[in-house]
Amino acid sequence: MRGVHCRRRGWHAEAERWARRATEAARQADLAGHATLLVDLASLWHGLTRYAQAHECARWAVESLTAEPAGPGRDGPLADALVRMGDVERRQARYATAEAHLRRASGLVDGLVDGKDRERAATVRLALGVLCKETGRYDEAETCYREALACLERHGAEHPMRADALHNLAGLAHARGGGDPAGEHHAWAAIEIRQRALGPHHDHVAADLAVLGAVLADQGRHAEAAEVLHRAMSIFRERLGADHYEVAVCQVNLAHLDDLQGREEEAGRRYRDALRIKRRTLDPGHPEVERLSALVRARPG
């Protein structure tokens, strides 16, 4: 709990110290019946972009819960653990393994009807949608996002996970290209929900601003896009640290804008900084690292 508190406050070095202490305690303890604590610990490591540790904790949770008798009391937490496993695998570009975990999670929660399980079903759909988007299956991704929204309908327009689905729909519009105006609408809707719930300087708000900036860039609104992206990056740096993955995402988008406006030297600096961060965060063979490495090598000078 201390680590989660520090992570939410943006104290990442302190959060990581607590996460390491908790992981070491977990290795020495019998956590039978307490696998949800491992899921929480995996989520903390994931938020710190320490994916090997997140995978380890999520795997422990899956193994512990799989050994328990099937039923609603086990299946929900097991689905949570599988979603975290799937998300970590996706982050490392192990897409087939990620999808297997997420499909298994979907089978556990589909058909359950209470409020918590509807949220779990939405979480699985969102995770599957992101995986489909990253593997180029855009129509499947949109279906997953809209199914997530349908799962959340009973919770009202202000449910935080509704903002997640809207954010993802905005990101999908950017991935498809073409300056789809629906992307801007979805991004602003997500920003409004999150600012009311979390305030204007939360890293989730920054994530929505970042996708808005990418959508505005697609529309050729370069000055507006740069302003929004700088605002997002400032929040990320303040809340998550200068070397966080999300800072690299902003740097890539800003570098693209610099290139479009003839600022090649500034663009090159941003691309190199983004590559440095992504190499710290992702596996060396990750497609994002390989694409960015090739882009940096191809630039003059």
Image (cartoon, rainbow, N blue to C red):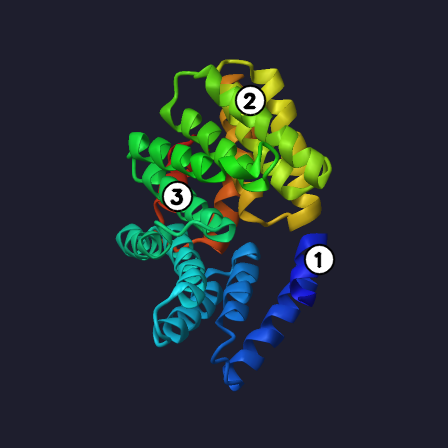
Compare marks 2 and 1 and give the one earlier in the sequence: 1
Q: How crowded is mark 1: few (under 14 residues within 10 Å), some or many (20 or more)?
A: some
Which element carries disc 3, helix, strand or loop?
A: helix
> How far is disc 3 from disc 2 in space, using C-alphas?
40 Å
Q: Residues within 10 Å of mark 3 (few under 14, many from 20)?
A: many
User: Label 3 belongs to which residue?
Assistant: 125
Compare marks 3 and 1 and give the one earlier in the sequence: 1
> Which amino acid type corresponds to the residue marked 3 in the rendered image?
Arg
Residue 11 tag number: 1
Q: Can residue 270 be seen in this view?
A: no
Which element carries disc 2, helix, strand or loop?
A: loop
Which element carries disc 1, helix, strand or loop?
A: loop
In this view, the mark in front (3 or 2) = 3
Tell whether label 2 touches label 3 (CB within 8 Å).
Answer: no
> Which amino acid type corresponds to the residue marked 1 in the rendered image?
Trp
Q: Is residue 260 left or right of residue 21?
A: left
Q: Where is residue 7 in the image (x, y as percent from the top left)?
A: 66, 57
Q: In the rendered picture of this protein, how many numbered marks are placed on residues?
A: 3
Residue 263 tag number: 2
Compare marks 3 and 2 and give the one earlier in the sequence: 3
In this view, the mark in front (2 or 1) = 1
